[in-house]
Image (cartoon, rainbow, N blue to C red):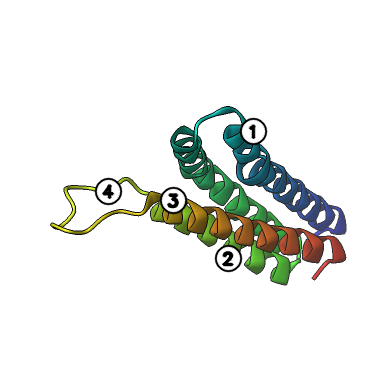
């Protein structure tokens, strides 16, 4: 491929990765801090859970796009890390899927633990997206 096309694809992949990093920072850090400052505990917990449930598919999609662009831009390792990060964002959404049916007698759903685990996963794969961006910047 022409060198200018490879450079363009790599730069577009880096831009998509940066977009996901900014969005995930707002979804996982900034907005929950504001929610817990202004809302009651239960409402803030529901808001954070819903926010991550709704933003993780878009972040996953953009990381798939970024992964494809990075692979097309000859940054193979960065593209693979971006695709792993995309899977992680989708896994976060699956973790927060609404429950169906009733619980068995005596079983309780612990929503606070679910929120904590999903925010941790979301942040972990945000770090993976950051690693993909750094690897793409280096050209690996």
Q: Is residue 48 above or below residue 74?
A: above
Residue closest to the eye, 110 or 72: 110
Mark positioned earlier in the residue sequence (4 or 1): 1
Looking at the rendered image, the disc whose residue lies closer to the viewer, 3 or 4, is 3
Label at residue 75: none
Question: Dot 4: within a 10 Å radius of its alpha carbon, few (fewer than 14), some, or many (20 or more) residues?
Answer: few
Report x, y in % for residue 60: 55, 51
Circles 2 and 4 in contact, beta carbons < 8 Å: no
Q: Earlier in the sequence, mark 2 or mark 3?
A: 2
Quadrant housing residue 140: bottom right
Observer-side mark, 4 or 1, equals 1
Measured in 3D between alpha carbons, the distance from the residue under mark 4 to the one under mark 1, in whole angstroms, is: 27 Å
Q: Are marks 2 and 3 in contact (CB under 8 Å)?
A: no
Vertical order, 122 against 77 (above or below): above
CA gap between label 2 and label 3 equals: 26 Å
Q: Is residue 67 visible?
A: yes
User: Dot 1 lies on which element?
Assistant: helix
Which label sits on residue 84?
2
Query: Residue 14 location, x and y as percent?
Result: 77, 52
Question: Given this view, does label 2 or label 4 mark the residue nearer the observer?
Answer: 4
Q: Which residue is mark 4?
A: 99
Instruction: Pick whichever, 131 or 74, lies toward us.
Output: 131
Please state, as top left, top right, bottom left or bottom right, where the N terminus lies in the image: bottom right
User: Which numbered disc, 2 or 4, marks the residue that appears first in the sequence?
Assistant: 2
Q: Is residue 86 left or right of residue 92?
A: right
Q: Return the residue at label 1.
A: 34
Q: Check contact, mark 3 vs mark 1: CB within 8 A.
A: no
- For the residues labelled 3 and 4, say whether their Cβ atoms are less than 8 Å apart: no
């Amino acid at each position: 491929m022409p060198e200018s096309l490879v450079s363009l694809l790599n730069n577009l992949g880096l831009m998509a990765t940066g977009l996901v990093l900014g969005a995930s920072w707002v979804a996982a850090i900034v907005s929950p801090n504001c929610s817990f400052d202004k809302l009651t505990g239960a409402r803030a917990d529901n808001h954070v859970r819903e926010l991550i449930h709704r933003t993780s598919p878009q972040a996953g999609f953009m990381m798939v796009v970024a992964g494809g662009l990075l692979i097309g831009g000859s940054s193979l390792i960065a593209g693979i890390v971006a695709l792993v990060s995309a899977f992680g964002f989708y896994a976060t959404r699956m973790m927060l899927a609404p429950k169906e049916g009733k619980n068995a007698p005596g079983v309780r759903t612990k929503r606070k633990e679910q929120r904590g685990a999903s925010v941790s996963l979301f942040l972990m794969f945000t770090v993976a997206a950051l690693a993909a961006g750094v690897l793409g910047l280096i050209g690996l």
